Image (cartoon, coloured by chain):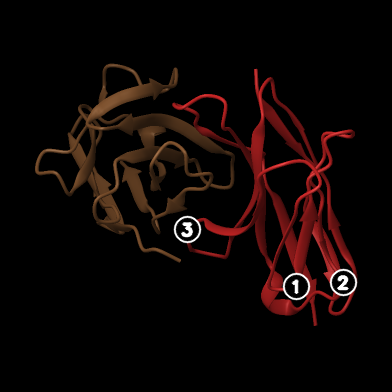
Amino acid sequence: GNSVTQMEGPVTLSEEAFLTINCTYTATGYPSLFWYVQYPGEGLQLLLKATKADDKGSNKGFEATYRKETTSFHLEKGSVQVSDSAVYFCALSDRSSSASKIIFGSGTRLSIRP
Amino acid sequence: EPEVTQTPSHQVTQMGQEVILRCVPISNHLYFYWYRQILGQKVEFLVSFYNNEISEKSEIFDDQFSVERPDGSNFTLKIRSTKLEDSAMYFCADRGQPMNTEAFFGQGTRLTVV
């Protein structure tokens, strides 16, 4: 079945550091890939998405590229801020099925030190 | 980002009681999900609901759970007889139509069973 694997956290970085959160997936069809972010005490917000191979999703300085050859969708940001502290979830949805649910990874907690 | 509204934001209930969690999705949309997140853990799929019918459900979604859209707007999740282990954040998500790639999540309802 379909699944998502994320690097385990927590990840602690200093402000302005470079961020990478690894995500790999297993899918039988043609998944769309997502990163969702959950700020403390809040719900899930869509951060970015990519719907086909080699697409790059980007938002708020974050980027992720859909790599079919390595089945990966790693999240990157060149210079993190304290306000980026949150839990980040990689997720997929298999568009080949009209009833497809969104499957989440286990989440990676990111803490940024001033 | 489109807004999905959930009520209440926090509910405390005694074990064995029935609870109803409510979601107001985006107008004219047809495809919804319920997810839950036990504190600090993974976001787990419960059920998907398309065009007023359940399209998929997980093993978690047993006979104690039900969903409906009684008035064509509110989308509800009912837990018939709550257990301590039902304590979690419950998220409603709106996907609009099956061909859409992403889903938009509400802020969640924190359910505490005592």
Q: Is residue B5 above or below residue A34?
A: below
Residue type highlighted by circle 2? Gly
The image shows residue B92 at horizontal and vertical percentages of 37, 46
Q: In the figure, is residue B37 to the left or right of B69?
A: right
Q: Earlier in the sequence, mark 2 or mark 1?
A: 1
Which residue has dot 1 on it? A61
Query: Residue A78: which disc?
Result: 2
| Quarter of the rendering containing residue A28 | top right
Q: Amino acid at mark 1?
A: Gly
Mark 2 touching mark 1, by CB under 8 A?
yes
Q: Residue at x 68, y 27 (%)?
A: A3
Find chain A in the image and tell me its colour. Answer: red
Residue A43, position in %: x, y?
Answer: 47, 58
Q: Colour of chain B?
A: brown
Disc number placed over residue A43 in the picture, else none: 3
Residue A26 screen position, x and y as percent: 74, 26
Residue A26 sits above or below residue B39 on the image: above
A32 relative to B109 in the view: left or right: right
**Image quarter in which the C terminus of chain A is found:** bottom right
Q: Tell which of B96 and A21 is nearer to you.
A: B96
Q: Nearer the viewer, residue A98 or B52?
A: A98
Mark 3 vs 2: CB contact within 8 A: no
